[in-house]
Amino acid sequence: MSVPLYQRIAQQLAEDIVKGFYQPGERVPSVRKLSMQKGVSHATVLQAYATLEDQELIRARPQSGYYVHRSPALTAPTPEMSVVEAPHAVTRSGIIAEILRQSRRPGVIPLGAAVPCSEYLPLRALHQQVSKVTRFHSQRAFDYSFSPGYEPLRRQVAMRMRDAGAVVDPAQVVITNGCVEALQLCLRTITRPGDLIASESPSYYGLVQLCELLGLKVVEIPTDPESGLSLERLEEAAQRWPIKALVLTSRAGNPMGATMPEHRQRALVEMMSRHDIRIIEDDVYGELMFDQGQSRALKAFDRADTVMYCSSFSKTISPGLRTGWVIAGPQQDAIERLQTFTTLSACSVSQMAVSAYLENGGYDRHLRHVRQAYRKNLSCFQLAVQQYFPAGTQISRPKGGFILWLSMPAQVDARMLFNQALEQNISIAPGLVFSNTDQFNHCLRLNCGIPWNQETERAVETLGRLAAKQLAHQRSGAGEAMAC
């Protein structure tokens, strides 16, 4: 029995998607173009596209066309959630510092730190703006800048907050030295040494370090790699322990890449308001969500000033300019005072250059470009991990950003893998730095913010081979022990 024409067209396009000819997020040929290429009617092409939609390989976008939704070759499961452990004083900063120091060695392929390659940053435009600022506004550019920061930049930030779903006045914005200072200022204004905070599990290792420096205890809340922090476990923890604040990323989280659905975001804000627990939102990857307009920040659902919002341009414009911001609501005055007597404010040149870049346009075009690039990179990394890593490796499915979380078989020691990879001039971020517990010692995070090429693929292949060798050694040792 002959295969219908529309099915043959659908099968051929599906094969192109599997081979990577069309990447997730890319537009496939229009109905008109494909009908001309194949010499068939529009109705036949529409039938073929309907078949691919049923298989969830493509999706239609109103008045735009059809786009690849996912790669059918990615079949590895997503990582599992952790379990709740009792609050702990944080003791991991020494390990984190050592791993970060080793990973910065010259000549290392940077799959560890979540820093975008310069190829994905608007360096040329920034160079022009820095030159103009230092040439034509040198007196102000080289003078002190005091909290709350450069007013034109605060205005630009307030405008961009509309994209996150939050209506903010420029007077509510405080410019900071990146997102880390924003997080630190928030924690220092609402907690004291010995207080307890809740965080995602696993969570950003910078938060782990901050909590140790500030003498805070942490209760880690299990986090789903797709839908984010567990509201059910958080409710239980809030009833059991005196939590002062919750720190989390609701969009493209670090390290799992989870994005919390809006109905759960709304429920989370209401829950924390009911328990009188402040939320510190780290939204540093928010502008790198692949499907813009389909997600909002937690701050968009904040009606009682429960959310203290933190972000920066480090992942989109430049990590070196150290330009971030915080919207702290009732704590703004305290944050401005604290910042004034610690760092004064962010660098004047950086603030003025970033403000000029945002004012002159091109930023949204740049974001569209890098979102597409990161989406492609993540797909390539995912498929390579599935190909080269041991069977049973679980892979996250981020909806934005450029980091990938892997959960390898339990016998693989990610810290040992880190040391073995460094000998091959490859850096990774082992799972133990993202938690104050030992639940993620077989996990690792990969930075996909670098170009996918033969060198990158060889690095992933090497990591997979080292993990497989470790696993085989562990299993053979266990087998010998049982034989004895």
Image (tube, rainbow, N blue to C red):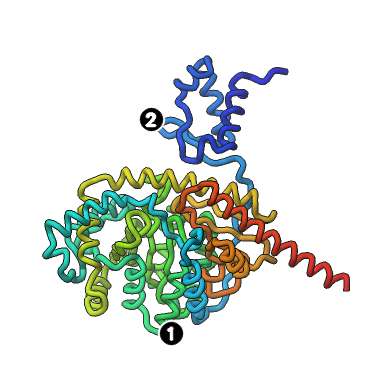
The disc, 2 or 1, on the residue closer to the chain's N-terminal end is 2
Secondary structure beneath dot 1 equals loop
Which residue is the extreme one toward the right? 484
User: Quick check: 215 above or below 167?
Assistant: below
Looking at this view, is 478 or 80 the one in front? 478
**CA distance separating discs 2 and 1:** 55 Å
Quadrant in which the N terminus is drawn: top right
Q: Amino acid at mark 1?
A: Gly
Q: In the image, is 239 to the left or to the right of 214?
A: right
Residue under the image location 51 percent in, 69 percent down = 434
Name the kind of residue labelled 2 in the image: Gln
Q: Is residue 257 visible?
A: no
Query: Which residue is tagged 1?
Result: 194
- Is residue 28 at least partly visible in the picture? yes
Whether residue 219 is situated above or below residue 281 in the rendered picture: below
Q: Residues within 10 Å of mark 2 (few under 14, many from 20)?
A: few
Give the percent coordinates (x, y) of residue 315. 38, 57
- Decide which of 145, 297 is in the foreground and name it: 145
Q: Give me the disc on residue 63.
A: 2
Q: Position of residue 351 (x, y in %)?
A: 23, 61
Residue at 57% in and 74% down: 437
* Mark 1: few/some/many CA within 10 Å (<14, 14-19, 20+): few
Task: Determine the image quadrant of residue 474.
Answer: bottom right
Quarter the C terminus occupies? bottom right
